[in-house]
Amino acid sequence: MSAISSLVPARFLTITAHLVIVITIFWSRVRKKWFIFNLISYDTQYSSSLLIRYFLPLLEVCFPNRQLSPALAVHCSASVSLSFFVFEKWECWTYWVIFATCRSVCLCVVANKCVISQIVYI
Amino acid sequence: MCSKSMVSIATRNQDMAPGSQPVLSSTPLQVLLYLNSWYFAAFYLAEILMFIYKGILLPYPSDNLVLDVVLLLLFLGLETLRIFYGWKGNLCERSLSSCMSLSILLPCAALAVYYLLLQTFVLRLEFILSSILLCFYSLEFLLGVISISTFSRSKVY
């Protein structure tokens, strides 16, 4: 019981850390436009990334969360690697690599859960 | 009069266990208080680390540094009291403790605004963390007012 009750604030704090680091990166992009978005034009990439950023977590929240720990680990690794991205001044394309890796792992977990729950309900 | 009270008792009876009082405590408020205590712990740790960073790297006047650190200590005490009273008032369904928690919320919000805008050097991280804290405060204020009205109404028969 104690492990489960400590898992909830851990997940909350990890998601908050992820949110804070993403907001920080977008903020610095406002100051220096070349920081992330020097590859494709400004508007399309900005809107698409915002859409992805805010739509996919909603999708994640909508599904019932039975297994908390995989999503927790993915959020944690994403926030750690994004902080490396900020501090070590990595190249801009690494942001998309981090994003794609973590998001695909997370979606795999969610899809797996859905399939499992469907099988259980059937 | 009698039929009215009977009707209200009957409607209350629908969502409670037989032979027990209806539960008036607000679950969203309790969740918010729980998450707020964890969030504030992380916020406080980050603030301490950022003050060390600012004290080392930036040309901080010593008077301002002392003021900010003392206000940070005050913030810890006020927030602990607020969460304690809010927790107790919500779980014991006491409107007095909830009112106490709401009245302590005002200086806490003022301190959060101080760390958001008015302190000597505002880092970007501090700005984001304080604004998240203010989001917590506004939600808790709303839910606290609603729960106090619920507790007070239930005492009038």
Image (cartoon, rainbow, N blue to C red):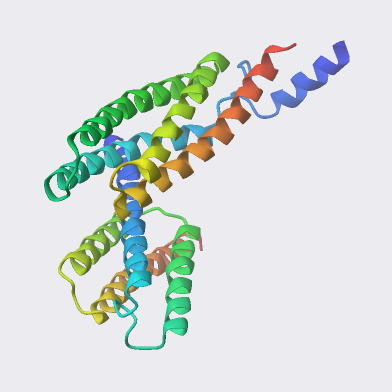
Q: Report whether A120 appears left or right of B14.
A: left
Image quadrant holding the N terminus of chain B, namely top right
Indicate left or right for B55 with B19 as reference: left
Residue B88, compared with residue B26, is above or below; it is above
User: In the picture, which quadrant includes the C terminus of chain B?
Assistant: top right
Picture quadrant of residue B96: top right
Whole-percent x, y for residue A91 in the image: 21, 79
Q: Quadrant of residue B47?
A: top left
Q: In the rendered image of this protein, does residue B62 appear above or below residue B3?
A: below
- Left or right of residue B40: residue B29: right
Q: Residue at x 33, y 37 (%)?
A: B40
Q: Is residue A68 visible?
A: no
- Residue A53 visible in rendering: yes
| Residue B149, percent from left and from top | 65, 24
Which residue sits at x=63%, y=15%?
B19
Q: Position of residue A92 (x, y in %)?
A: 26, 79
Relative to the observer, which residue lies in front, A118 or B39?
Answer: B39
The vertical placement of B54 against B1, above or below, is below
Q: Nearer the viewer, residue B137 or A58?
A: B137
Query: Is the residue B92 above or below the residue B119 in the image?
Result: above
Q: Residue furthest bottom?
A: A40
Image point 27% across, 75% down: which residue? A95
> In percent of the image, x 34 and y 81: which residue is there?
A37
